[in-house]
Amino acid sequence: MEFLKRRIFQGAGAVLSNAYVQGFLSASLYQGPLKNGCTPLLNCYACPSAILSCPIGTVQHFMAARTVPFYALGTLSVVGASVGRMTCGTLCPFGALQDLLYKLRTWKLPVPPWARRFRYAALVVLVFAVPFLTGEHWFSKLCPAGTLEAGIPWATMNEGVRDMIGSMFWVKIAILLSFVAWSATAKRPFCRAACPLGAIFSLFNRTSLLQLAWDPDSCTRCGKCQKICPVDIRPDRKAADPECLRCLDCTRCPSLKATTVFHAHPFAGAFPQWDNKTMGTES
Amino acid sequence: MKGRRAASLATAAAALGLLAVGLLRAEFRETLSNAVLICLSCIGIG
């Protein structure tokens, strides 16, 4: 049920942040007042149907203008301080695509733990440093979500855009295809190894108001929480892991529970039994 | 636990402060013009 709920939220996140369907019909961008708001998702604002601004694009814009992006970073900080990486796990359309691709029946490989360093590097180098030094939005130039949501639709719909396509467009296509192939074999590789938005939110996982609580008394250390985790972590070992997407899939196990920092004893008086059925791992 | 609660509240207060500064500077007006300007970068031709 929790899993199904997350799919519904992911669908709603994709539809609501891309509600300007007319953009695809008339090959135009939405430029109304909602575009003044930053979405807490990786959703390209050059997508014809996007109604909100991409926070990473906005940060790059301000860095390129050599100004501190208070508004974009403030919006992300408020979301991160409230729920940590929860929007990555429950609303992000690019994350949802990776979840679906992983369901394909191919061989499966783990993402190495050191890969997470690359998303912090992407944040510092491509989102902050390079735009500040060169005045160009280099993360946007490489972003696979932008290729999928804006590059391909615009190149398909607009002849003028098609005429302007150069080698950079094909580099973007190659990056997108690499992540699509990787997502079929590994759990959420883009979120874990490349997403600068995830890097920002993961800084808040330890101190966010929403927390994941683990009950050592009822936990049998069976590892089923890792099996169902979309980023392959062991929440029973580190409930405030920066990798955790706060998708709450693991709360199907009664030893794990969503709580807030205001609850000192989230498991007080509750020791329910669990089995394979409640965990969704019954074969 | 009290330490974590204090850290969480301090983080939330700092985040709200950051957002308030951005709103006072009316930076949100720039995100709209940015959305149009950055389009070519997102497409990979800018």
Image (spheres, rainbow, N blue to C red):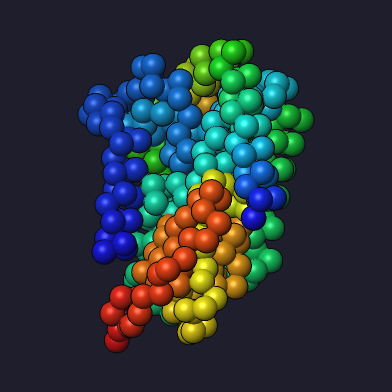
Above or below, A160 relative to A240: above
Residue A91, position as x, y percentages in the image: 39, 47
Nearer to the camera, A191 or A30: A191
For the image, the number of numbered tags is 0
Taking A149 as reference, is A132 left or right?
right
Residue B10, position as x, y percentages in the image: 66, 37
- Does residue A45 show up? yes
Taking A60 as reference, is A187 left or right?
left
Nearer to the camera, A119 or A159: A119
Above or below, A163 relative to A7: above
Residue A196, position as x, y percentages in the image: 60, 46
Give the quarter of the image for residue A280. bottom left
Residue A59, position as x, y percentages in the image: 61, 30
Taking A124 as reference, is A259 left or right?
left
Query: Residue at (48%, 61%) from the top-left corner?
Result: A266
Query: Residue at (55%, 50%) from the top-left corner?
Result: A261
Query: Residue at (38%, 22%) from the top-left corner?
Result: A34
Above or below, A109 relative to A127: below
